Image: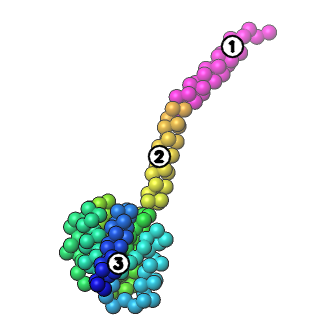
Amino acid sequence: MTDKPVRADKATAVAELTDRFRDSSATLLTEYRGLTVAQLKELRRSLGRETTYAVTKNTLAKRAATEAGIAGLDTLFTGPTALAFVGGDPVEAAKGLRDFAKTNPLLVIKGGVFEGKPVTADDIRQLADLESRDVLLAKLAGALKANLTKAAATFQAPLSKMARLAAALQDKQGADATAEAPAE
């Protein structure tokens, strides 16, 4: 009789994890064995405001991933596993994990899910090497503005050449007219 409340709790936990898998732009799996509570708190801060870092039981997380329609993660659910559910920019979260793992080698990036597809730890490191979405958008806007400026200059060039040519012709006609005028 005492098993029923426990099963209900597990079902609730699986449902919450399933929703997190579905609502996240990416989910990154790590092994946190040997990290202190203070280090885990520091890690949570380094991941940004839109990423939650949760320690879960492998069986519950595996079941939630399956219910969310995510395949290919079963081999990653070994050992102590924590999940980083990314609500914002996955690049920012990947950088946070990579940088934290550099100073705390006990954190092991296992892999994860990005845009509904499984990714390896190497894929996450490559993602961390990208610039953030905001930086990439700013670079794109700068490149577009530069191209528009060049185009405007190109379109204005024939007009300014024509104006200079007309002014030169007018000056020449004025000079010719004064040279041809009879002297008194």
Per the rendering, the mark at residue 119 is: none
Residue 152 sits above or below residue 131 on the image: above
Q: For mark 3, what is the residue?
A: 9
Place of residue 35 in the rendered image (x, y in percent of width and height, measured from the top left): 37, 89
SS class, disc 2: helix
Q: For mark 1, what is the residue?
A: 177
Give the label, 3 or 2, closer to the camera: 3
Does the stretch in magenta take in 28? no
Q: What residue is rendered at 49% in x and 35% in y?
A: 154
SS class, disc 3: helix
Verify CB contact (< 8 Å) between mark 3 and mark 2: no
First in sequence: mark 3 vs mark 2: 3
Q: Residue furthest front?
A: 1
Place of residue 38 in the rendered image (x, y in percent of width and height, measured from the top left): 45, 89
Q: What residue is rendered at 53% in x and 37% in y?
A: 153
| Of residues 82 and 69, the one drawn nearer to the viewer in this rendering | 69
Residue 170 sits above or below residue 74 on the image: above
